[in-house]
Amino acid sequence: MDISSKLTNLSKKSSDMQKDITVLKKDVSGQKKDISVLKQDVSSLKVLYSTLVGKLEENNRLIESKYSDIFNLVDGLASEIKDQRDFRTITTHNISFHHKRLNKLEKVVFTTT
């Protein structure tokens, strides 16, 4: 192979490499744009995440508050039911006691007359 054919060969290889370099530069440029878009998306997602976390925390506080209110209401109702039962038991006992007393009094009154 002579020198001119080697030079022609090297020239073609050099030209092909330049084309490859140009294509790679375009690929890198496209990838940089993609990276930039992805970074913006990540930033937007971080903001959205922070907002959602804030809303979730607020909702959790509200739920805890409502749970506490409901617990207090149930506790109050349970106490009121207990008081009502105690009152009914005492009243029933008193009625029974007075009924027995009344029966005894009736026997005493009706047997002496």
Image: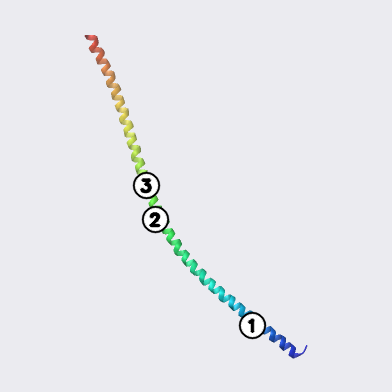
Residue 43 on image: x %, y % = 47, 67
Residue 101 falls in image quadrant: top left
The amino acid on which the numbered mark 1 sits, given as a three-letter code, is: Gln
The amino acid on which the numbered mark 2 sits, given as a three-letter code, is: Glu
Residue for badge 1: 18
In what element is the residue under mark 3?
helix
Classify the position of the C terminus by image quarter.
top left
Residue in the picture at 73% in, 87% down: 6
> What is the number of the mark on residue 3?
none
The amino acid on which the numbered mark 3 sits, given as a three-letter code, is: Ser
Query: Measured along the vertical axis of the image, is residue 79 above or below residue 101?
Result: below
- Residue toward you, 56 or 12: 12
Colouring of the image = rainbow
| Residue 66 as seen in the image, left or right of residue 23 | left
Residue for badge 2: 58
| Residue 67 as seen in the image, left or right of residue 29 | left
Which tag is nearer the camera, tag 3 or tag 1? Answer: 1
- Residue toward you, 47 or 64: 47
Q: Residues within 10 Å of mark 1 (few under 14, many from 20)?
A: few
In what element is the residue under mark 1?
helix
Residue 60 on image: x %, y % = 41, 53
In what element is the residue under mark 2?
helix
**Mark 2 → mark 3, Cα distance in angstroms:** 15 Å
| Upstream in sequence: badge 3 or badge 1 | 1
**Mark 3 → mark 1, Cα distance in angstroms:** 73 Å
Q: Residues within 10 Å of mark 2 (few under 14, many from 20)?
A: few
Residue in the picture at 71% in, 88% down: 8
Residue in the picture at 33% in, 40% down: 76
Residue for badge 3: 68
| Upstream in sequence: badge 2 or badge 1 | 1
Q: Are marks 3 and 1 in contact (CB under 8 Å)?
A: no
